[in-house]
Amino acid sequence: IGMVAITGNPDLFITTAEKLDELGVPRKEKHVWHSNESISIMPTDPDRSSVYYVVVTSGVEKCKFNIVVATDRYIPTISSAIQGKYRPTPSQRAADIGKTFIHPALLEADLRR
């Protein structure tokens, strides 16, 4: 999850569905992850989930930011090609690219800590 501030100073807070009862909606005091720019949640992360709650707040002023969420899986043909092991065919590359989901959004927040 990547975030770029356009105006203001936004903070990104994330909580998983599994921790929602314990922590509540993500906020400064209680969250699983926090960042001012981006967060990478790896498959090996013990807190990894399939559902995330994301909140962006600003310290003092209203903020405007761009946020991008991307899911990426280990893709054998592309990963092997990057390592120089072999070149995937165009149909293999097309099938693998379809396994990556990217969702961009331009948002504003007037929620202050």
Image (tube, grey):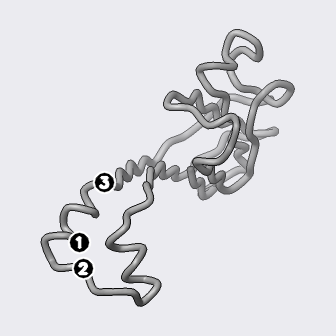
Residue 75 percent coordinates (x, y): 38, 63
Residue 55 percent coordinates (x, y): 63, 31
SS under mark 1: helix
Q: Give the amino acid type for the residue marked by disc 3 in the picture.
A: Lys
User: Do labels 1 and 2 touch, CB within 8 Å?
Assistant: yes
Residue 8 percent coordinates (x, y): 70, 50
Q: In this view, does 100 lie to the left or right of 40?
A: left
Residue 57 percent coordinates (x, y): 70, 35
Q: Which of 60 and 44 is in front in this view?
A: 44
Q: Nearer the viewer, residue 58 or 44?
A: 44
Q: Give the amino acid type for the residue marked by disc 1 in the picture.
A: Arg
Q: Which residue lies furthest to the left in this view?
A: 91
Q: Give the amino acid type for the residue marked by disc 2 in the picture.
A: Pro
Read off the residue under disc 1: 93
Who comes first in sequence, dot 1 or dot 2? 2
- Label drawn at residue 59: none
Read off the residue under disc 2: 88
Who comes first in sequence, dot 1 or dot 3? 1
- Label drawn at residue 99: 3
SS under mark 2: loop
Instruction: Identify the residue at image location x=73%, y=43%.
Output: 11
What is the distance, in whole Å, between disc 3 and disc 2 at their CAs?
15 Å
